[in-house]
Image: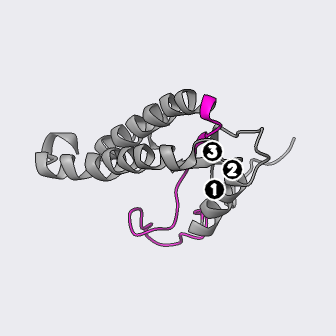
């Protein structure tokens, strides 16, 4: 929860999810300029789109990453660099370990496939934001038909 989130932990989340990608993007720009199909793909999250208790700091960091990515996309277009975000939903990782059956969650390979599709699109095309959501398979109780 935000009220009990330590300042040092907040800084670590921001350093990991915002500062790290910022430094990598800034360093990659001179190397990618003018190369056909040059693409930067940042892995954001669907977390900023759905408020959830105890994920506020994580969601805020990913929202900042989305804003940075969107701004860089506009700045880098003239150099022929495509910049995109992949926004995965619940993914089976150590960050979001589900209690019980987690078979409904995305597999990390599902997210990797989305990144690959963005990076290998034709050089003139850009999927600027790709949302990847799990397809939940649940048995639902339906009322009897009349």
Pick whichever of labels 3 and 2 is earlier in the sequence: 2
Pick whichever of labels 3 and 1 is earlier in the sequence: 1
Dot 3: few (<14), some (14–19), or many (≥20) neighbours within 10 Å? some
Q: Considering the numbered disc 1 on the image, is that residue within a helix, a strand or a loop?
A: helix
Magenta: main secondary structure equals loop
Dot 2: few (<14), some (14–19), or many (≥20) neighbours within 10 Å? many
Query: For residue 59, which quarter of the picture?
Result: top left
Verify whether residue 80 appears in magenta. yes
Per the rendered image, the range of residues in magenta is 78-106
Find residue 113 and report its horizontal and vertical position in percent: 68, 62
Alpha carbons under labels 3 and 1: distance apart: 11 Å
Residue at the spot of label 2: 118
- Which residue appears at 49% of the width and 35% of the height? 49
Nearer to the camera, 26 or 56: 26
Do the CB atoms of the residues marked 1 and 2 lie less than 8 Å apart?
yes
Residue at the spot of label 1: 115
Do the CB atoms of the residues marked 3 and 2 lie less than 8 Å apart?
no
**14 relative position to 108: left or right:** left
Residue at the spot of label 3: 131
Nearer to the camera, 68 or 2: 68
**99 relative position to 116: left or right:** left
Is 67 above or below relative to 117? above
The nearer-to-camera label among 3 and 2 is 2
Q: Quadrant of the C terminus?
A: top right
Alpha carbons under labels 1 and 2: distance apart: 5 Å
- Which residue appears at 49% of the width and 37% of the height? 69
Residue 87 makes an appearance in the image: no
């Amino acid at each position: 929860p935000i009220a009990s989130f330590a300042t040092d932990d907040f800084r670590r989340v921001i350093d990991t999810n915002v500062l790290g990608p910022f430094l990598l993007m800034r360093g990659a720009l001179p190397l990618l300029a003018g190369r056909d199909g040059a693409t930067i793909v940042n892995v954001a999250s669907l977390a900023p789109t759905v408020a959830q208790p105890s994920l506020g700091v994580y969601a805020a960091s990913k929202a900042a990453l989305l804003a940075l990515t969107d701004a860089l996309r506009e700045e880098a277009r003239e150099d022929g660099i495509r910049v995109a975000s992949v926004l995965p939903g619940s993914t089976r990782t150590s960050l979001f370990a589900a209690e019980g059956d987690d078979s409904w969650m995305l597999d990390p390979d599902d997210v990797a496939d989305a990144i690959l599709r963005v990076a290998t699109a034709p050089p003139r095309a850009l999927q600027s934001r790709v949302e990847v959501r799990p397809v939940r398979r649940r048995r639902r109780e339906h009322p009897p038909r009349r």
